[in-house]
Structure formats: structure tokens, C-alpha cells
Amino acid sequence: MEKKRKYYLDYLRIISIVLLFPVHTLMVWNDYGQKFYVWGGDNRVLSSLIILINPWFMPIFFVIVGMCARYSLENRTTKQFIVERVKKLFVPLVSGVILLVPFQTFFARKYFYGYKGTIFDNIIYFFTRFTDMSGYDGAFTPEQLWFILFLFLFSFIGILSAKVIPYDKVKNKISNINIYCYYDVHSCMGRILYRKFWRI
């Protein structure tokens, strides 16, 4: 029997994606000292909106993606799932790191470090220097594509975990976990990983 598509997941995913745009745009006016590519001065109202949205929309994004991956595996073999992840995650990740991120680091380097060189020199610098992974000094970083990188890695971790710990064996235990505790734990884990590797 063909399973119906769970449209509520699509709606939640669309809302989360849409929220990415105002959050990243408003970061230009944050008043709590967090670096961004450029800074337009502090604005308490706009910063409050960022603080209101930030704590929950990315963790929800991860949960939605995890649920979608689970449903995807019901209709695909492990090999098909991996091929799909490579096409949908790894290829866009590599393309973005090559075609988009070097130009962002160029402007960040100019703004924060007064860089006077050419964009071509910065591209060479980008692919040959590894520092704190923030990208503000022009060195290599996946920058906003960290989310795709994490999803790609977690997909393989999830596949390996499923081979060792079958879903059916933990299904009942997981269903008894308080959803708020589950959310809090994943929210904290995401923030720790993000701030450890991208200190911005």
C-alpha cells in the first residue's frame, strides 16, 4: 500500500527555510557582538527578533530532516539512500563552497581586516589557508553551508547506527521520551557543535 505524503513536514520545512532569510539579513544589525560579513550598527528591536527565532528554528529543521530521512528509507534501499544524499547534499555543498563562499569571505576579509588585494588572490588564499573556520579572515570555511555538511555526515552516521541498532528495537523507548527533553538535547548539541567549529 502506497503511503501518503506527510504534508505537514513539507509545511514546517518551508517555514524553516523562509525564516533563514530574515534571520541572516537581520544579523547585519545584531547588537550582541556576534560577527557577520558586514555590520550596519546595532539595533535592539532587530536583534530581539533574531534572539526570538534562533533558538528553535534550526533544531526543528534538523528534526524534520531526520524524520524525512526515516520515511525515505522506507521506500529506498541503503544504496539508493546514499546515492540520493550525495546528489542532494554533497554535490550542492561542494558547488557552494567553490562558487559562493569564496566571494563571501572576500567581503568579510575586506570589512574586518581591511584587505586590499584582488578577489582572485583571495580565492587562492581561501583554498590554501585553514584557520578558525569562521571565514572572516578569508580562509577556508563552509560558512552557511555548515548545515548541509552536518546533514551529509549525520546521514551516514544514521545509516551506520541503524545497522548496529535496528530501529524497531528502540522505537518504543524513543516514543516514551519527552519531546521537550529531546528537543532541548538536540538544540544544545547543535549549538555546541556550531560554536566549536564556527566561532562567529
Image (cartoon, rainbow, N blue to C red):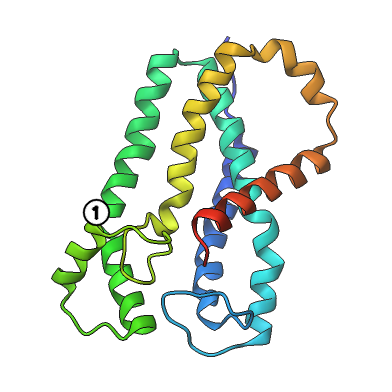
Q: Name the quadrant of the N terminus.
A: top right
Question: Please, is residue 48 above or below residue 144 in the view?
Answer: below
Amino acid type of the residue that numbered disc 1 sits on in the rendered structure: Ile
Q: Residues within 10 Å of mark 1 (few under 14, many from 20)?
A: some
Identify the residue position indicated by label 1 in the image. Answer: 98
Residue with the most extreme bottom position: 41
Question: Please, is residue 67 above or below residue 165 in the view?
Answer: below
Task: Give SS at disc 1.
Answer: helix
Is residue 121 rendered to the left or right of residue 40?
A: left
Q: Position of residue 34 (x, y in %)?
A: 56, 75
**Quarter-wise, where is residue 118 in the image?**
bottom left
**Quarter-wise, where is residue 109 in the image?**
bottom left
Q: Position of residue 106 (x, y in %)?
A: 28, 73
- Is 64 or 185 nearer to us in this picture? 185
Q: Position of residue 15 (x, y in %)?
A: 59, 54
Residue at screen point 41% across, 59% down: 133
Is residue 174 rendered to the left or right of residue 187?
A: right
- Count every numbered label the image shows and give the total: 1
Question: Please, is residue 80 above or below residue 39 in the view?
Answer: above
Residue at screen point 54% across, 28% down: 69
**Quarter-wise, where is residue 79 in the image?**
top left
